[in-house]
Image (cartoon, grey):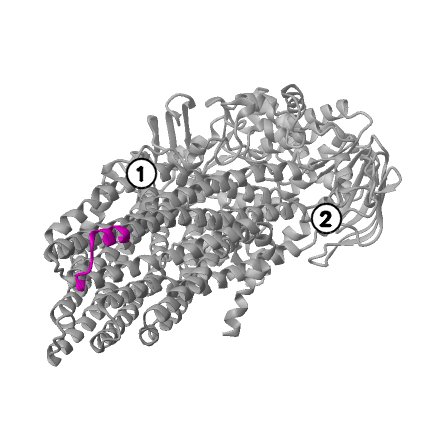
Amino acid sequence: MSLEALEGKTPPFTRGTFWRLMRYMADHKVRLAWALLLLGAATSADVAQPILIKVFLDRYLIPRHFPQTQLIELAVAYVLLFVLTAAFNVAQLLSFQQLALDIIQRLRVDLFDKIQQLALSFFDQTPVGVLVSRITNDTEAILDMFMTVLNTFVQNLTMLVGVIVAMFALDARLALYCLGLVPIIVLVMWLYQRMSNPVFHAARQRLSLLNAKLNESLQGMAVIQIMRQESRLRNEFETLNESYRKARYRNTQINGILLRPLMEVVYLLTLMLVLGYFGGHAIVHAAVNIGILYAFVSYLSRFFEPINNMLQRLNSFQQAMVSAQRVFQILDNPSRRPQPSSALTPQIVRGEVRFEDVSFSYDGRQEVLKHVSFTALPGQTVALVGHTGSGKSSTVNLLMRFYPLVQGRITIDGTDLAQFQEEELRQKMGLVLQDPFLFVGDVASNIRLGDVDISDAEIRAAAEFVQADTFIQRLPQGYHAPIGERGATLSTGQRQLLSFARTIVRNPVILVLDEATASVDTETEEAIQAALAKMRHGRTTIAVAHRLSTIQDADLILVLHHGEVVERGTHQELIARRGLYHSMYLLQQGHEHEASSVD
Amino acid sequence: MSERMDILRVFLDLMWFFRNHQRRYLSGIIFLIVVSLLGLVPPVIVGRAINRMQHQTLTAPVLEEYLAIILVTALSSYGLRYLWRVQLFGGSILLATVLRDRLYEHFTRLSPEFYQSHRIGDLMAHATNDVQAIQETAGDGVMMMVDSVVSGLAVVITMAVVINWKLTLISLLPLPLMAVVITHYGRILHERFTLAQAAFSDINDRVQEYISGIRVVRAFGQEAFERQSFVELSRDVVEKNVAVAKIDSLFDPTISVIVGFSYFLALAVGSLYVVHGTMNIGNLTTFTLYLGQLIWPMMAFGFLFNVVERGSASYDRVQQLLEIDPQVVDAKDALESVPSGSILFDIPSFRYPHTGITVLQSIHLSLAKGTTLGIVGRTGAGKTTLLRLLLREFDLQEGDITIGGTSIYAYQLQALRQAVAYAPQDDFLFSMSIRENIAFQSPDASLYEIQEKARMAGIHDDILDFPLGYDTIVGERGVTLSGGQKQRISIARALLAEAEILILDDTLSAVDARTESAILNALKRNRHGRTTLIATHRLSAVEHADQIIVLEHGRIVEQGTHTDLLQQRGRYFDMYQRQQLENLVQQGGVAHES
């Protein structure tokens, strides 16, 4: 499996990505200005300190001139300066970090809102893990950039400018020489960026492969052991582990060549420059301003620390840009869930469902539904049967308006499906899904599903109606029994009954059943069938059935094959026809002769 | 402080590694020390130059000599800095690699009992976070210890001996405060950071759940509720991070204030000495430069405790994990030969070790070589447990299971498992190609053999329909397989092992009736003379078995062939009746109406 596939495809990052991120700061202009002001104040106070010492050295210590009041004032000013520097810095750092956190909060909510608006086809194509990673990990990487990278850069650049200004004030010529350093530093940064980036990313990708391997091995350990593949997998893991080690080692080497060690050399070379400059001056002119020399030497150390910091952040910056690119890719995704086509607010009252010549394709190429037409009169049950892939679920997807309809027409109570408002559809159409997905919470919250208007009594009534009440009562905390991840604490049948309750509590006019294939024990199965029969009573029902036994009393059965309705009629009519339905029926019966021989 | 020192014990714990890589660590530490000694040179040069400049005794040759010394220092410490990093950090990376390998190896030896009482997420955390913390201890930790102790002392001694011990004492007064502050902040920071991580993990779980359940969310119109919950969680993340930021923002400024006081004392008191003539300005400059060089060792001293504290806790956790012994092990002098022959179960009772609940009772059963055993019963009746005992996933507390008259406990585990091919209930597939999945147990199998077994398992045609055929990747990053497809791949995988004993643990439940009977027929044709065990709750899968047992609450309640059992008119008959009932009703319905 290629590394690229693992990380998800990302176009190379462009300058636009960076500026687009920066635009998120525009909402916080005042706070940003305030943070910058504090930063400026902190830097000025910091840069002023060596100047005070220079004054002290040149004006008082070297000439041995000690006017008490001036010296005290100088001392107080010096102490005040570094205390102020610290105070401004605390305020500045905090406001930058808060700003960053607020921006990320905004970005996360924007992303979430976008995801709510995406068409379901997007989710079909994107693995869950990847999408989760976009919302959490990628935004976290961007947060890191706002919080530390940007902050470091702004702070350090300000510091550099401050130091350079101070140097110019002290000795313009020497300052000019020192400026010669800037191209060298830029060159080092460029080199580092070029050399370390591929290695840094390789290390990251190998680490995620390594962790994926470990995670999967732990999940499938029983299989690995029973199939005696321990040593093979150990070798595979060791190979991956070693390749990760190599990448990390290479990273350490590059850091050792280009980061702090190199900057220390540059620092000492600059120190030589300063010393040589003043020394040369001293040899020629015999007099030298020691205070300025002292100040220069202190500035040098202040000059290099920020550069070291910036170099260390370069990798995170690159990473943040990659993440931002991915986040923007989602924000720019043109796919959109079907929207109501008008501002009208038609109501679903009777529950008449009509498909008129509906054709559909997920990918625009392969048609999964071809010219499907049928009518379910209020209170009737229409059952869809057919093999996997015959188009049963697609019919449900269209009726639920999960996917936009392109060809044909679906109406409810004579009104185009597209015209209904979202709330109306979701309230009046109750869907029971094949996979009774449960959320972490408790039994009641899984029936309520966020609708605060549903009372506890209604929840209980719904549970009683679908006969889920019995098992719920037996749970240690009844309706408040906690439900773990994906409802792992409940059996498949119990999960199904709960999902019935959540549908029926909303009292839908139309019931859409996507029957479960999973096998449950016979008693639960009976309870499920009884509940389904009760639920269908008095409601228009569109049911996808896998077991023909459950839909024998349907008013209309549609037999789908490769997206087409190949047979239609009641159970008896279809059996009499001896067609596809009949053979499916025979197949499901299987062993009738043996049963009759027992009789 | 003794408690403090106690955590340094982790360095002793890691001694085995340091000793194995003696050269690397010794040279790394020596280079690091030499670098810090070299660092003592430039400040002296600067001080001397200033003195000569002030007294106008600086000549061109002297200046050249000074500059040359700095240049040599610069270049040699560049090389040494590179070297110690590569040695020490390289060593710590190696340590992490070794630990990960060890953990993985250990994981592969631990029995199912261990996995039932440990969560995968926790095990992952040990292999990632804990290993990371140990790595930091062996890299940054060692470096900080050397820097804070050796370099710090070297600078302090030089300041005291070469320049002025009284001034050294006075100006160092505020610095110990720094180590205290850093340790303190470091700890709070770590605590708050852990909280922030937990909040982050909450939102991660929530989003994961939301996306997995997106259809439910949309079908029930829960969007607003979900949004609110997301906003609240992400706000919580922000709040926890602001708490971190608050300490984080205090960190550097606090240090700079302490350092500031130190400088101030040095300059103020140092000036007095200069005035009194006990010191010159050059020395004072050298002194303040040294003071600057002390900041890092002091900070390192503070960081050291946090790094080591975390590393020590992590090392203990990893060590504890490594000390857990596998529950299922080979007996002394275990047989290397692969068991063969009829299977005998003689189990008075069996209970799972971690729950203590008895799951099997009085199972006495013999199964001739080459026959098929059907095991039926409800979920939880003990079907899977019985099969897992045969595979020695768990060991019996009493009784025995024999193959060909020899106890399975007398064989090596690997030999036993070579005799058995297993298609498990939860049809776990790896995220590799379908081909690799089928050949998981037999990596050397040819494509022809793989396809042959796939055909037998009734999955060949399905596979050819996938975009890349047999090379299609399974799972999140490839195709999503249906339950039935997974089961059939898992059957093909078991068939490819060509073992004498085949176990199908409810592996046909999601397969449709026609495919089921095709698979069963293929099995019958191809596994002549070999033993098959099929657990199921669908009776059609075991109808043709030579022997069927009905399990209820861990006991065999009925036993015999399909025909026998039907005649007994007991539980099996009831189950059969119930499964037939639907069909009978349907048939009756049709018969009367048409």
In the figure, is residue B338 to the left or right of B137? right
Number of the front mark, 1 or 2: 1
**In the image, what residue occupies the spot 72% across and 59% down?**
B356
Residue occupying the far right of the picture: B405
Q: In which chain is the residue bearing label 2?
A: B
Q: Is residue B55 highlighted in magenta?
A: yes
The percent position of residue B63, horizontal first and vertical second, equals: 23, 53
- Quarter-of-image position of residue A450: bottom left
The percent position of residue A555, horizontal first and vertical second, equals: 49, 32
Query: Quick one: quadrant of the C terminus of chain B?
Result: top right
Q: Is residue B174 highlighted in magenta?
A: no
Circle number at residue B322:
none
Looking at the rendered structure, the kind of residue marked 2 is Ala
Q: Which residue is mark 2?
A: B381
**In the image, what residue occupies the spot 18% across and 57% down?**
A36
The percent position of residue A567, horizontal first and vertical second, equals: 50, 22
In the figure, is residue B103 to the left or right of B562? left
Residue closest to the eye, B323 or A246: A246
Query: Which residues lie in the magenta part?
Result: B54-66
Question: Considering the numbered disc 1 on the image, is that residue within a helix, a strand or a loop?
Answer: helix
- Quarter-of-image position of residue B525: top right
Question: Neighbour class for label 1 at 10 Å: few (<14), some, many (≥20)?
Answer: few
Q: Which residue is mark 1?
A: A191
Residue closest to the eye, B589 or B158: B158
Asked if badge 1 and badge 2 are on a common chain, one would say: no
